[in-house]
Image: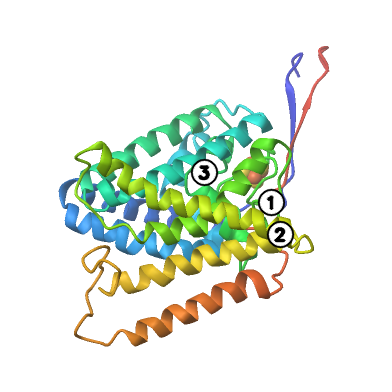
Amino acid sequence: MEAGQAKVIPFTNNRLSGRSLLIWRIAQTLVWFVGLFIFFNLFFNPTLGLLLFWNILIPVAPALLVLATGLWRNICPLATTQLMPRHFNLSLKKKMPVSLQAKLQLISVVVLFFLVPLRHAIFNTDGLATAILLMVLSTIAVTMGFIYDWKSGWCSTLCPVHPVERLYGSAAIFSFPNAHCENCVNCSIPCPDSTPNFHPGLSKKTSWHSWSGWLIAGGLPGFVWAWFHVPDQHGIGSISELISIYQIPFLGLVVSLFLFNLIKTVFTKIPEKKLILFFAAAAVSIYYWYRLPALFGFGNFDKDGVLISLVGVIPEWPITVITTITTLFFFWWLLIRKPPANSWLIRPAYLMRQVASKKSS
Ligand code: SF4
């Protein structure tokens, strides 16, 4: 061995191989092509592209993140794209410092809160704009994949969906095998994929971690509630229109954060984890409380976010029954049930690196 060369000792446990690996690769490829199909439709057939993206894929996502976060982490087409440089050994595999990971996680929460209101003004009704947004996100993700090891550059830091995964994913139904990381190199600390019952209050290594955890857990329910009280509009014609799409969601965000702090201060005996899970259950329940009726034409604004209108075909009460059931379910699943100690994914065996002595061995 040459001087200074790293001696690599891989362990083989928990590493996908053979048939299981093939099945996951097929699933990743299929979902990647579905993503590509939606992407091209956003460009060339925006009516279908917008329907598939905003009215089918996105409404399914929160429930998937609650029940099987790891499944989404394994098959997300953007993750598959982002990790291609690593899979094809083209990444520099840099180790990201923990403080930078925490800062990027905070940025991802802020980006989420700034992007989502823009749906009302631009993305919900403009296929080209949504496609460009996906292109920009993919470019940043892949660039980070060329620089940083495994998921540290995007999936566990900068991705704007990741804060929602962290909030909703504390009670996953299974620990799926990790279909991306071949061996664990400890790229993300703590690794959200491999830590059982992960939630945003778990990591407080730096104040950046605490800020991002507080912002997403405390702020999301009010933000979601308020977001559903803003109608879609076509474009932004003036500063006052721009302000109008942000002011109600941001007011909801602030009120929600205030309530979170108030409960934490007054009811000091409530463990912080319980409070976070209560807010997580509230956020996802509020989402479906408004989104399910809207999908079938019974929303606050009858033309916004409709998948198929059932107005005049069925009465509204069956939808109300379903939203009541989903609300009870999410509170039971996240808050009342004692979940098994599942992580989103099973950590693959560590890749141990020992730097050899400067002298030749
Ligand atoms: S399992 Fe290991 S290599 Fe994969 S994302 Fe987690 S810390 Fe990084």
Q: Residue tagged by mark 2?
A: 273
Q: Residue tagged by mark 1?
A: 201
Report the side of 287 relative to 162 (left or right). left
| Residue 178 x/y as whole percent | 60, 53
Report the side of 278 relative to 131 (left or right). right
Question: Which amino acid is tagged 2?
Answer: Lys
Is the residue under label 2 in contact with that under label 3 (CB below 8 Å)?
A: no
Question: Which amino acid is tagged 3?
Answer: Val
Q: Is residue 166 visible?
A: no
Give the residue drawn at x 53%, y 43%.
155
Q: How many marks?
A: 3
Is the residue under label 3 in contact with that under label 1 (CB below 8 Å)?
A: no
Residue 272 to residue 192: above or below: below
The alpha-carbon separation of the residues under discs 1 and 2 comes to: 7 Å
Query: Quick one: 102 or 177, which is closer to the camera?
Result: 102
Question: Which amino acid is tagged 1?
Answer: Gly
Q: Residue tagged by mark 3?
A: 109
Callout 2: few (<14), some (14-19), or many (20+) C-alpha neighbours within 10 Å?
some
Splitting the image into four quadrants, where does ligand 1 fall?
A: top right
Give the residue drawn at x 45%, y 45%.
112
